[in-house]
Amino acid sequence: MIPEIFELAGRLPVRRLGYGTAQLTGPGYWGPRGEARDAVAVLRRAVERGVTLIDTADNYGPSIAEELVAEALYPYPAGLVIATKGGVVRTGPDAWHIEGRPERLRAMCEASLRRLRLDTIDLYQLHRLDPDVPMAEQLGALDELRREGKIRHIGLDSVTAEQLDAARELTDIASVQNRYNLTDRASEPLLKLCEAHGIAFLPWFPLGNGSLTTDRVCADIAAAHGVAPGQIALAWLLHRSPALCPTPGTGSLTHLEENLDSAAVRLGEEDMSRLDALS
């Protein structure tokens, strides 16, 4: 039986297959992707389909993705978990600058609260650890925001297993986000650590930035199940570990429906063996 629910921090339930908002922005995650009404329609349909975890970031756009989430979904339905990220400053398409000074993290978090129209952010993730600022200062700033009630849980993005261990000595960590998919499993040690400690692992590029939608093995298995190759790649993640909570993003209603239908795909032992061998 594949678990459908993951409890963030052991007490905040979300459906494991969520929705990510990066694809609602333009090339290089900069500017709008298209008409706002199209993005609003996708977000609303995701929630209609039962998605309870929306993953966004202040720098998608920048600001655009968070604003679209609020436009589409506020007032938020009960049980919907909004996760966002801070700690990266954008100066142009594909231009990312890490910024982890405590005063900047506070300003970013408070700006996200305003854009999302929230009093408390359920899951606030440090988008990158700043190598020029001690980890204790960065996580200390987030802990202070948590004590003030501005965030509920803390997550990390793009960390090693060793960094997660170090962070856990400083504060409670509810989630991590690292690149992980069928053909990129460099973060396997981190996944095992998450499993051991009940930490959610939100894999980014769960479809290999689109490459897995054309993978031959995925296509062969998909044909046998009567589904699309990308659905096999997402179903593999859900079967691979109960800690994995993929949040595939799209600006297309058709692709959204396809992605969410992946939760119903049941892979057999032979399917999993063939897919596991792709690593």
Image (spheres, rainbow, N blue to C red):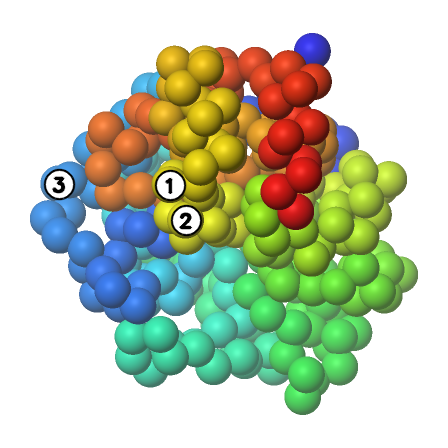
Checking the image for residue 37, the label placed there is 3
For image coordinates 33% across by 20% down, the residue present is: 48
| Mark-to-mark CA distance, 2 and 1 | 6 Å
Query: Depth-wise, is mark 3 or mark 2 nearer the camera?
Result: 2
Circle 1 sits on which residue? 214
151 left or right of 213? right
Circle 2 sits on which residue? 211
| Mark-to-mark CA distance, 1 and 3 | 29 Å
175 left or right of 224? right
| Quadrant containing the N terminus in the rendered view | top right
Percent position of residue 216, x then y? 44, 37
Q: Nearer the viewer, residue 113 or 40?
A: 40
- The mark nearer the N terminus, 3 or 2, is 3
| Mark-to-mark CA distance, 3 and 2 | 28 Å
Placement of 98 over or under 190, stated as above or below: below
For image coordinates 31% across by 51% down, the residue present is: 23
Say which element carries label 2.
helix
Percent position of residue 28, x then y? 30, 68
Say which element carries label 1.
loop
Disc 3 crowd, CA 10 A, few/some/many (<14, 14-19, 20+): few
Amino acid tagged 2: Ser
